[in-house]
Structures are given as C-alpha cells and as structure tokens.
Image (tube, rainbow, N blue to C red):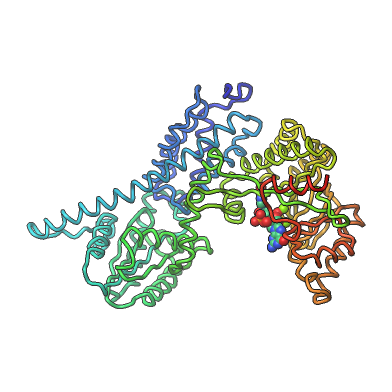
Amino acid sequence: MGAVGQSRKPGEKWFTRAWSKAIASTSYVAMSREEIEEFLGRLTHKLAAALLGEPFCAAPAAEVGAALVEANFTTPATLSKTIGLLGQDAIELLGLVSDEVLRTRIVELQAGVANGFVGALRDRTLREHEEIRQAVLDARMQLAGVGRRPVLDTDHSGLDVLDRDGFLRRLDEVFSSIDPDLRVGLVHLDIDAFKVINNSLGHKVGERLLGAVAGRLAECMGDLPAQLARIGGDEFAILTVSDQRLGDSLVSLAEKILAELITPLSFDGHELAISVSMGIVERPILAGTAVELMRDADITLYRAKSEGRGRWATYDEEHNAREVSRYTLVASMLTALERNEFYVEYQPLVRLSDKTVVGAEALVRWMHPEMGKLSPDRFIGLAEETGLIVPLGRWVLQQACNQAKSWQDKYGTAGPFVSVNLAVRQLWDPNLVSDVAFALESSGLEPAQLQLELTESAIMGTAQQPLNALRALSEMGVRIAIDDFGTGYSNLAYLRDLPVHELKIAGSFMAGLRVNGSNQVDERIVSALVALAHGLKLTVTAEGVETPAEAARLSDIGCDLGQGWYFAKPGPPENLDCLLAAAV
Ligand code: C2E
Ligand code: MG
Ligand code: MG
C-alpha cells in the first residue's frame, strides 16, 4: 500500500473530532457531552493514528470495538449504524472520497472495530456469567454468616431500587431455582432521547431526573410483586418472579407507566415531560438462561424504539431470531469480502424474436461459512445500512466487467453485455463514475457492453450529484436501465430528465400472461409499458418470464428482451458459455 494522500491529508485532530462527533449520535449513554467527547476522543484518536500510520496497521481497531462494548456505548441494535459512521459515512463526512488508500484503510478499520465488538461481547457474556456466579457465592456466604445486605442505590432516596450488580445477582438466584413452575418477567425500560436532556441540562439534572423517574415507576408498580432496578445509564428493569403467568399484568403496567409519564415530572424547579420505551419478556425460567432473558428484553426494547418510541413491545420469537441473525450477519459481512465469500451468478437476457442470448444480469450471492448460500435479499439491505454496499458493489462491477470481457474475447460481437445492479447508496457515492471508469479500463471492456440497473425509487427526486453521475456515465457510453419498472412511483417525469436507455418490466406483471386471456389487465399494462418505452426510444426487457406462453405473448407484444426461469435460472458463467457456444 502506498503512502497516504500526501496532497490533502487533514490532520489527526481533525479526524478525531469529526469521527467522534459522528459516532456520538449513534448511542444513548448516561454521560455528559464532555465525558462522551473525552471518551470517544480517546478511541477515535487511536483510529485516526492507525489510519494515518506508516506502515498501516489495523490492529488498534479491535481495541476500539472492545472499548465501545465495555462502555455500553453500542449494542447489537446500533452496531450497524456505528460501523456505518466509522466507515462509508466517514469517507463521505471526512471528504476522503478521492483518496483510494484512505478508503481502503477505513474499510479495514471498520472490519477491525466490528471484530473487536463481537469478541468483546462474547467475552462479556461469559465474564458476566462468571461474575454473577461469584457474586451469588459471596451472597450465599454472607447469608450463612453476617447476613445479607440489600443492594440499594442511595440516589433514589429510600426507594428499593437494585443497582445493576444487585439485579444480576437477583436474576441468577431466580435462575438457580429448582422450581420447574417458576416464571420470570422483565420490563426493560429506557428513557427516549435521554442524551438530549443530559446534554442540554447537564449531567446532574439528568441524574435527578432519573431519580424522579424511579419514583414514578415505583408508584406505578403499586402492589405488583415486582423489583425495580436501575441497570444502566437511563435504563431500568422491572422484574417479576412468580408461579403465575404475569405477561398481561406487565403489559398493563407498561400502559400505566406510559400514561403516568405524560404528566411532566417536576424537580429542582424543572418541569420535564419524558417518554419511555419498554421491552417486555415473560417466560418460564426453564425456557432459557438469565443472559438470554436480558438479551431478548434488550432486542424487544429496541423494537419498541424502532417502531416509534414512547411505546412497549412484547417479545416476538421470530423478530428476535431475525435480529440475532441480522447482527451476526452484519458482523460477518465486514470480513466476507476479503475472505472471498461473495460470488456472482449470471442470468441470460434473451432476445425474444429469435431467442438469442444478448446480455446477462450479474446477481451477487454470499456463501456464508455457517449459513450456506445466502440470496441478495438477505444481505443487500444490511450492506446498504452499513455502507458495505459501496465496496461490495464495486467488486461485483469489476467481476462482471472482467466476465463480459472474457465473453467478448471468446465470442466476439456475439459476446453478451452485462447488466449490474446499483444500490441507492452507490448512486450517491462520489466515486461512482471513477469506479466504473476503472472497472472498464482495467478489464478492457467497451462501455457499451455495460448496463447499470437502478430502481425507480433510487432515482426519484434525484438530486444534482447522482444526476451528474448518471449523465457522466451515459456520456461514457454506459447504458442505464430502470429495474423493476412499474412497481415504484407512477411519476414518470424522471424519464424526461434522465439518460435512461432501457426499462425492465417487473416480473409481477407476467402472472397475467401465464394463462391465455385470464388477466387482460396485466397484458394491457405490459403492452402499454412496451409502447411507452418504444415511444421514448428505449428498449424493454420483461423480467420473471417463467413459461413459453409468456415468452410468446411478450414477443407478440413487441417486447425486446426477456429474462426468467423459462430461459435459465441465474448460475455460474459457464452456464452461459453452454448457451453461447451452442448458438455459435
Ligand atoms: P433484480 O435486479 O430485479 O433481479 C431479478 C431477480 O429475479 C433475481 O433475484 C432473479 O434470481 C429473480 N428471477 C429471475 N428470473 C425469475 C423468474 O422467472 N421468476 C422469479 N420469480 N424470479 C426470477 P435475486 O438474484 O434473488 O436478486 C434479488 C435482488 O437483489 C435483485 O433483483 C437486485 O435488486 C438485488 N441484487 C442482486 N445482486 C445485486 C448486486 O450485485 N447489487 C445490488 N445493489 N443489488 C443486487
Ligand atoms: Mg436487476
Ligand atoms: Mg428486477
């Protein structure tokens, strides 16, 4: 790797400030703004020093990931946002767009942070378990000897509020019980936007507010046999242990808490209305461990937050499983690219009039070491969220260009063009045009042999930057196609303003062509779309062609190309070679 961007290298201090400011917005921690700045300043100093260091070494990134876990700064739910800000967003925020070396380094640091995060989270779970066991032993010895001291947080003026350690000890006691009928319930509660209050009114006011909230919560709990605990900065837990199902009572309690907190809390001359989000889990103790209960309540709480805050959510097994695997996917995706776990399949684009293969769509897949083959629907959205879509998309583009060039070398003018999907975020990436130019140049592929597919939603309301990029690409000779046409917006104004060459009609319209005459509406829509495209001098591809009847109808209608299982499923490039060789 060469020396770092000599011409326009901003100083380390500048990186540190900009990075920590960005990350600060991804989490709610009970720290003052100064404390957050100091904490993140230290971590991002490490990253910035690594970024600019010669020789480059990504190792400190893992320490940053571990420190974020240690300080409860980021959770599985917010990890992808933090990683995004450390990575692709940082590249944009810090204006590093033209510096290839720094961009590559940032992706490596990003992967390092995620690895450190995952490692530390695993260690913490193990360690907490060990700590809980040790604490229980201590508590039992105390019981046998000096008697047990209740663990009270004196901040909450006389209320019976356990602190985090006390709460974990209590949980472990519960889960050590041998009573098979015992059930445990947990309301995990978090104050919405507490950071804003803390930042604007100061740490001390924040602490007083938490005391006042604890008082309200205790009032709401009333006679319910439940224990209140403050388990994190602005996080509370309400624990029930019973041989009865208390799920409904916990939901009623959550409703009551929401209703009670509508009345502003007054303290120290401040009147503050706050809202809270809650995750509720209720189950037999035999259903799992204390650590699983905490994790599930945390994920449920985040669901309540993501559904709009100021509400409660109850545990949903399916959602939970999705979140856990989502989190695992985000973490493993960051290293998947360098481990060569992605690969590209190609699906032929066939001229309907004579069934000649004229093009191929490149479709990315992920061979996950544990989960096996994953389709793009599983990971493209996550890759967009984390920003990884930019390097991943660049890689797919390069593969596709190389492949098309090799087809051209083998079959000359009969070699198919490649059509590559472009995500919204790639469209906004200021390096898109130079990335495409590089892929073409390094592969030796003619620009006319490359098509880029964008969905309607990606180009709707397109701002100047993406518009300029599309125009530059079109001027280079690259074709632009609108993917899944007809499923997005009905406002077609963009067709007037954008350099579009092709419409790909969404497969959902093909159903009506399947049985002769059964759905005239779909057929009319397809005919109208084909006429519209031809009127605008655009070519049309029909997606999702599954039967010979559909292919025949489309050909009659005048549609140019077809793509679908009827012709071939997506597969390795060799599958296309068979079709192309047969045609020569
Ligand atoms: P798409 O671009 O609309 O791709 C067509 C999808 O339809 C592919 O799904 C393809 O396997 C599927 N398909 C093809 N023929 C038929 C058929 O006859 N019937 C039916 N029911 N389906 C058919 P796939 O491969 O799962 O890809 C899903 C989506 O993921 C793609 O939709 C595209 O939006 C996205 N995607 C795939 N690769 C990439 C990539 O490299 N970058 C980006 N940004 N997105 C990608
Ligand atoms: Mg497509
Ligand atoms: Mg499509």
Q: How many marks?
A: 0
The N terminus lies in quadrant:
top right
- Image vertical order of residue 393 relative to residue 55, above or below: below
Position of residue 344 in the picture relative to residue 412 (left or right): left
Location of residue 283 by image quarter: bottom left
Answer yes or no: is residue 145 visible. yes
Q: Residue at x 21, y 58 (%)?
A: 151
Position of residue 419 in the picture relative to residue 129 (left or right): right
- Image vertical order of residue 537 relative to residue 14, above or below: below
Rendered-image quarter of ligand 3: bottom right
- Give how far across and how far down residue 534 sits, in percent: 90, 56
Q: Residue at x 76, y 36 (%)?
A: 405
Location of residue 266 by image quarter: bottom left
The C terminus lies in quadrant:
top right
Q: Residue at x 80, y 65 (%)?
A: 548
| Closest to the observer, 148 or 487 | 487
- Give how far across and how far down residue 560 sits, in percent: 86, 56
| Closest to the observer, 457 or 37 | 457
